[in-house]
Amino acid sequence: MSRIFNYKNFLRLNHVIMFVLVLLTLFPFLYMLAVSFSSSRAVMASEVFLLPKDFNLVAYSHVLKQDQFWIGYKNTVLYTALGTSISLTLTIMAAYPLSKKNLYGGPLVMKFMIFTMFFSGGLIPNFILIRDLGLYDTMWAMVLPGAMNAYNVMIMKTFFQGIPDDLKSAAKIDGLTDIGVLMRVVLPLSKPIIATIGLFMAVWLWNEWFMSLIYLKSDVKRPVAMYLRNIVLGAMNTIKSGQQMDQHSAKTVPATLQASTIMLTSIPILCVYPFVQKYFAKGILIGSVKG
Amino acid sequence: METVKLYSKKKRKVPFKQIKRDYRLYLLLILPVIYFAIFKYAPMYGITIAFKRFQPGGGMLSGEWVGLLYFKKLVQDPTFWNVFKNTFILSFSALVIGFPIPIIFALLLNEVRNNKQKRFIQTVTYLPRFLSTVVVVSMLFNLLSPSTGIVNEIIKFFGGEPIFFMNEASWFRTVYIASDIWQFMGWNAILYIAALAGVDPNLYEAARIDGANHWHQVVHVTIPGIMPTIVITLILAVGNTLNLGFEKVLLMYNPKIYETADILQTYIYRLGLASQIPRFSSATAAGLFQAVICLVLLWTTNQLARKNTDYSLW
């Protein structure tokens, strides 16, 4: 019994499990990649598995000719860049004062923010708020509602607290104000956490489609995720009338087109994360366990 | 005596001197606090819409009070109860199945000694987290398609009948949970992986000296070492359990599978935003229902955790 279940055999089994997991994780993605480069005929005949069949770029060139695709892409880049900057600025503005141990009222403000993690108004009041504020069908409806959350403030605050006090007080003795310390000492030392939170926000904004569904009316303001949704699930205007998109209309867009749109919209954001990856573990751990 | 009294009085006073000294910090805080007041707390006030006859064109403050009228309507609506049931079944199965898997994965990954392999596995398993819900769902439609999907090709290869997974009410939960695990397993494991790295190596040393084999070490050192992380994550997960991946359900479902796929949030969405006659008040009432249950769940789990373990959120 213990001969078979010894540690060495466990390690072997573990390697097999890991290998299968990696395969399972990558397969859908590689499959879509293969489909995007294949001919429609090969896809319909189920001849595509991991490698493209009848390699061609027809689907890509077709997508790249669509005006709506480019409009969406431009919007997505704009929303992502603008939203991430606003989000980082506001989060830093909140986290830095709150990281001061003796700020009068600081803990109260933190509680004020943390409460929102557990209770919220919900979909309808949020929608009415955006409308009442006059943000409906403007780009601000895409970047403002999600710009700040208590979780990010907490992670950022804990990171700031980890920066040695000696550095901060030394800078103060040299005549810097609190803001000066933030700009010239704290921020340069906080690149890992800024990169992590920046990436979280960027990924979220890049992929966001639901807010555009409810807050945006004009096609010219729609992000590319919405374009993708319409391609994939068909039926542009059925949502408005309360019906769900039916699967038959989805079939009108060939699988190769769907796959190439998926690739074109996903790859840019996938390219960023390996560079920021090394910061994740630290950032997340700080935020959620010691927060 | 008098000095003591003076001192205690002084302590209760607002320390103007300190506030004056830190005024720059307060200036920084103004904008974030306003942000939270407007974008987080104003919608909380908006919940009052659930108690008012709200005119779709009106502002958040408009409408006449009608008390619990919309809640009464809600509990009389059979659709609501079906939706309620679906939400609970889906969230609790997602929690029960989805919560332990990242922990097991992290423990197994921890046994991979080769650092390069470890990093590679991590990088790959994080990847799906960066895909948009739209992409994940369209991959599902593609892979599970009855005519060309690879999964059905495999079923056909083994002589089975193709299944239209996305159009079968009985398959919805399985597909939803499985794809969730695919998307978030690696990502959710990050926390545990980081916690595992923080377990004191001396403890392993001590355990080995006491004659513990590898399995004993896992049970008596590793798992207790990450227990705080597990408990905190569990509390948060339970508190969030009803806040399912609403967008994913919205993309996945269609009237044919409402029977199992329709959840509170999709119901709220249809009621309030997707219908020709928006029923804002009823939809808000349903939303409040859900928010209160979430809060109660969170509070209960936290109390339970505090009683039975040493760890809790507050």
Image (spheres, rainbow, N blue to C red):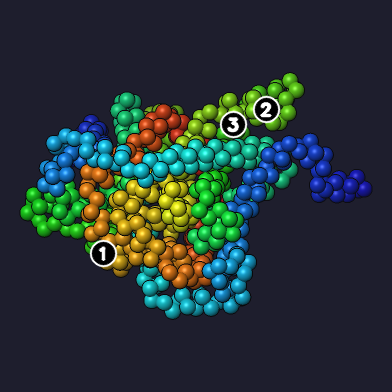
Q: CA distance from mark 1 to mark 2?
A: 58 Å
**Image-quadrant location for residue A11:** top left
Q: Disc 1 designates what residue?
A: B169
Which numbered dot is residue B73?
A: none
Q: B175 or B199: nearer the eye?
A: B175
- Label 3 – label 2 distance at C-alpha: 15 Å
Which badge, 3 or 2, is on the more N-terminal residue?
Answer: 3
Q: Of discs 3 and 1, which sits in the foreground?
A: 1
What amino acid is found at the position of numbered circle 1 in the picture? Ala
Identify the mark at residue A181; answer none if there is no mark: 2
The chain identifier of the residue carrying mark 1 reads: B
Nearest to the observer: residue B41 or residue B289: B41
Labels 3 and 1 positioned on one and the same chain = no
Q: Mark 3 sits on what residue?
A: A162
> Mark 3, mark 2: which one is toward the viewer?
2
- Residue B195: give x, y in percent of width and height: 44, 37
Residue A160, given in percent of the width and then of the height, sits at: 60, 33
What residue sits 23% from the left and 54% below the top? A252
Q: Is residue A120 visible?
A: no
Q: Position of residue A267 (x, y in %)?
A: 34, 36
Q: Looking at the image, which residue is at 74% across and 43% down? A: A104
Q: Secondary structure at mark 2?
A: helix
Residue placed at 8% from the left, 51% from the top?
B158
Q: Which SS class for mark 1?
A: helix
Q: Are marks 3 and 2 in contact (CB under 8 Å)?
A: no
Instruction: Please state which of residues B149 and B111 is positioned toward the viewer in this rendering.
Output: B149
Residues behind callouts 1 and 2 on a single chain: no
Decide if residue B141 is in sight here.
yes
- Between B243 and A206, which is closer to the camera in this rendering? A206
B124 on left or right of B146: right
Three-letter residue code for mark 3: Gly
